[in-house]
Image (cartoon, grey):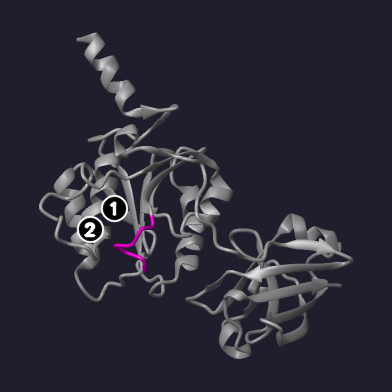
Amino acid sequence: MKLRLLLFLCAVTFNGFSQNNVLVFQSDFGLKDGAVSAMKGVAMGVSTDLKIFDVTHEIPAFNIWEAAYRLSQTAQYYPAGTVFVSVCDPGVGTARHSVVLLTKSGHYFVTPDNGTLTLIAEQLGIQEIREIDEVKNRRQNSNESYTFHGRDVYAFTGARLASKTITFEEVGPKLPNEVVKLDYQKPVFEKGIIKGGIPILDIQYGNVWTNIDKKTFANLGLKPGDLVKIQIFNGTKKAYEGKLKLVNTFGEVAIGTDVAYFNSLLNFSLAVNQGSFSDKHKIYSGADWSILLSK
């Protein structure tokens, strides 16, 4: 009996990382129809003991970059052993790999390998990657369905992994520790200027979030209360230029005032107190947008 228990514990643990019954979904499906509910139904069909949560289902359609960013924004706050299922899959049914990534932090990511893992791989590190065996890890009687892998493959595999129905090794064959990566502007400091990207908007409020972290920003030698010179470009076209006060909180300035601040991820950001910087200045996000900071 003791030997059987020991073998079971070994089966549900890999490199010290054990699944914890937590399953987190993300997609670009929206909530207007039953797609998300269908994925959760498949998961509950695997195990009613699962604890199911969502990152978001409002990723803009086919926007792999935003899917990558929202995972990196969220995953670090969940405990090791959590299984994430992310489905933003414009290449569904094509030759792109369906994978599960185990990070060095002990988190699992079930997703197409189409760039979605770009930031997670950098942020949490790659422990191991396995390709999903779609013969063994596919919802029963779904072989004739080619356009809903989120339901038939990813939700099913994620639920089986999170519920300990399968081990990580049973997901499928091991792959090289490499993922498909999207190109983006990383923050760099050179000759008194910081160049960075605008990966995302704080969409609810229209705040503009950059990827310039506090450590990189510190090269300018500026502190709260100082003015920051800002230039924003869409491709080669300058979309904004100005000097803004760096603040800790929005309440330090009058309503309607433009400010610079560090967001909850401690990245340099732009806002209007009780307004939308994006709407006011027509600034958006993505690979074509860049920002320069200086004194």
Question: Would you say 222 lies left or right of 9 here?
Answer: right
Q: Residue at x 44, y 59 (%)?
A: 114
Q: Nearer the viewer, residue 1 or 238?
A: 238
Q: Please, what secondary structure does the residue beneath circle 1 have?
A: helix
The circle on residue 151 is 2
Q: For the C terminus, give its image quadrant.
A: bottom right
Q: Label 2: how many residues lie within 10 Å, few (<14), some (14-19) or many (20+)?
A: many
Can you say whether 150 is above or below 12 in the image?
Answer: below
Which residue, given by chain and number where applicable, does mark 1 sit on? 154
Circle 2: element type = helix
Residue range corresponding to the magenta coloring: 90-96
Q: Where is residue 109 shown, x and y percent of the image? A: 40, 48
Q: Residue furthest left?
A: 141
**Quadrant location of the N terminus?**
top left
Q: Residue at 85% across / 63% down in the picture? A: 190
Identified by mark 2, the residue type is: Arg
- Pointer 2 with pointer 1, Cβ within 8 A: yes
Residue 140 in percent (x, y) is at 12, 49
- Look at the image and tell me whether residue 275 can be seen: no
